[in-house]
Image (cartoon, rainbow, N blue to C red):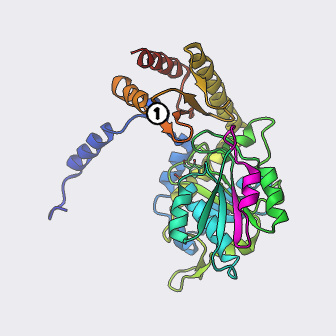
Amino acid sequence: MQEHGQNWEDVKSSLIQARSKDIPYEKVLSSMCTYPHPVAVEAYKMFIESNMGDYGLFMGTYELEKNVLAMLGDLLHNSRPYGYLTTGGTESNIQAVRAMRNSCKSIKDPNIIVPASAHFSFDKIADILQIDVRKARVLSDLAVDTKHVLSLIDKNTVGLVGIAGSTEFGQVDPISKLSKIAMDNSIFLHVDAAFGGFVLPFISGHPSFDFSLPGVTSIAIDPHKMGMSTIPSGALLFREEKMMDSLRVDTPYLTISSQCTLTGTRSGASVAGTYAVMRYLGKEGYRQIVDRCMKLTHLLLEQVKKIGVNPVIDPVMNIVALSISEPKKIRKELATQFGWQVSITKHPSSIRLVVMPHMTEENIIAFVQDLKTVLNS
Ligand code: PLP
């Protein structure tokens, strides 16, 4: 850090220079984030200094948080959810597993069972919480094999995890079967709907994945993904207050006497952004967004099939994985020749495309044209 401050014009020009190196979302098919809705941005700016880590000072923002939880509860079939707004899916998953572990203090060597397709946040969880994270295999449709889940349960199992919208393939695990297994074995069931939580409720005939299933004890859902909110915006919802309470620590020097959150200082601006966009769009607005993304997903599918490329699974939501040999090489060529950002999956190896609201019909067609060029070169 330099001794003397710089003038704002110079600082700003270095910001502009840095910004010009960021990739605009229009060329990004690899991200689960997108441009936040303008209403979320406007609200975010209004609450920029609000700190939910000491919400006694920001009771207005706290009311907005309660309101967001109620709206999310309504979306996920729970009229009285307990929880809070997190920094995203990783924090929500950590806290959900921490609550399972803390609620079973008598188990000295606890384990949880997650699908092999679970997000890498569960590897962080194994490390941070020092809990055995057992991975259940997936079937050919890339949803978890519930028979294998069952076989991994033992007396030290505190809970299961199901995914409603897997990171790589957008697959939904059979949550209703997991719910039954969890109930039969008196263990918790966390649903990672970080991505799918703002997609599935707006697709007609979607599989059940939320609190309507009696075994589901917590859900992660991310407003900063398909919820069109500002980063960082995640949410963790519990069915029962006692799970939330299991996370509580005393906070002697704050205006509030305890915290259940993982982070201390917390963005009230994100709370306001999420509140605003959810109120502004309503279910109808989200339905239109999801509808458009799904139409673009089907257009993408139709176009790639015309050039002889097939999906790994029929897309359940707006994520498509393409069966292509040498995906790493193709990914590199798409980026260097045409500036497209795509990602690759591990098992099975493929090119992964997330069709977020920033995508357009023209860009989908242009992408497939460029993919064809790369595949033929
Ligand atoms: N869970 C799922 C299913 C995800 O797809 C992701 C991110 O891609 C996460 C959790 C982690 O979310 P975040 O990056 O917001 O922490």
Question: Mark 1: is the Cβ under 8 angstroms from ligand 1?
Answer: no
Residue 25 seen in the current view: yes
Residue 64 seen in the current view: no
Q: Please state the horizontal and vertical placement of residue 243, each as a whole percent of the image.
A: 71, 72
Q: Is residue 156 left or right of residue 256?
A: right
Which quadrant would residue 70 be assigned to in this image?
bottom right
Q: Please state the horizontal and vertical placement of residue 54, each as a whole percent of the image.
A: 53, 73
Residue interval drawn in magenta: 139-161
Q: Nearer the viewer, residue 127 or 140?
A: 140
Q: Amino acid at mark 1?
A: Val
As drawn, 373 above or below 21 = above
Q: Is residue 156 magenta?
A: yes
As drawn, 9 above or below 371 = below
Q: Residue at x 77, y 52 (%)?
A: 147
Residue corresponding to mark 1: 342
Which quadrant would residue 242 be assigned to in this image?
bottom right
Q: Nearer the viewer, residue 361 or 134?
A: 134
Q: Residue at x 72, y 54 (%)?
A: 148
As drawn, 219 above or below 314 = below
Question: What is the secondary structure assignment of the residue under circle 1?
Answer: loop
